[in-house]
Image (cartoon, grey):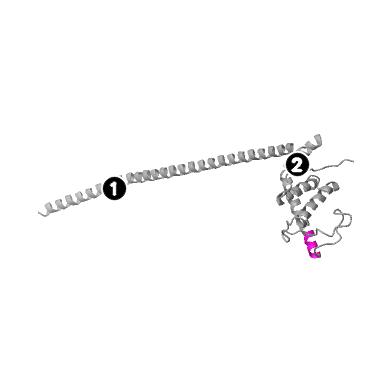
Amino acid sequence: MGALGYTLQRSEDESFLKSQKELLGEVDVLLGGRAAEQLVFGEISTGASNDISRATDVVKSMITDYGMSEKFKNMTLGKSGKGYGGPQEPELVREYSEETQKYIDDEIARIMNERYTHVLKLLTQHKDLLEYIAKRLLEKETMEGKEFEDIVKAESHCEELTAEAGKKAEERKMISASALEAGGAVVSEKAASNATASNASENAAAETKKKPARNGLLSRIKKDKAEKKEKKAKTSKTDK
């Protein structure tokens, strides 16, 4: 029976050294199958058992062999005490305490859980890309790294174009809003000017209305004075 799925990671160069980041990257790749199952089907199966085993071995080696743990930095744990059958036999004697063994187990579980959560989040963000690649694998069964990279780069380019278009749309929106605000300010200034002119016109009209009344009052006063003066003159003639 053939394998239902297999992930082979090949180095791009002949380097025999791997950084902590590169090792965690290998773990992420190995956990991708299990995360994809949960994301697409809502449940997990035994299909990713080999990948999980390899991922666990990588994390364990980081802690016990490569000194990449927070507590035991630059220390190797449990290199002796192998079985009589050779290095592949299980360890018969531990070089560390039960407390250290518990730390190793807890640290493996913590790192595996963190990487799985990270991978699940990443696949959720790129679910459309995941489904497209799955369809391609159904068509041709095997996908080379070059084709995979081209597909991922194409998606990234589309995302960049979408982001750029959204940015331009936002800029146009801001420009339109600024133009409306500027237009509103001009309208307000014009309205204020019109209001001032209207008030001045009303005041002038009121003054115009007051003038006849004032003129009539002055005429009446003059007439009264003239009448009084004439009356006084007549009275003086009569007395003589």
For this view, does 179 lie left or right of residue 200? right
The residue positioned farthest toward the left in the image shown: 240
In front of the other: 75 or 195: 75
Check disc 1 and report its element: helix, strand or loop.
helix
Q: Quadrant of the C terminus?
A: bottom left
In front of the other: 93 or 58: 93
Residue 92 position in % (x across, y down): 87, 60
For this view, does 159 lie left or right of residue 89? left
Q: In the image, is residue 91 above or below residue 129?
A: below
Residue 15 position in % (x across, y down): 72, 45
Residue 36 position in % (x across, y down): 78, 45
For this view, does 191 lie left or right of residue 111? left
Check disc 2 and report its element: helix, strand or loop.
helix
Residue identifier under label 1: 214
Q: Residue 100 lies in magenta, yes or no?
A: yes
Q: Three-letter amino acid code at disc 1? A: Arg
* Residue at the image position 76 percent from the left and 57 percent from the top: 63
* Residue at the image position 27 percent from the left and 48 percent from the top: 217
Numbered label attached to residue 130: 2
Magenta residues span: 98-105
Q: Residue 148 lies in magenta, yes or no?
A: no
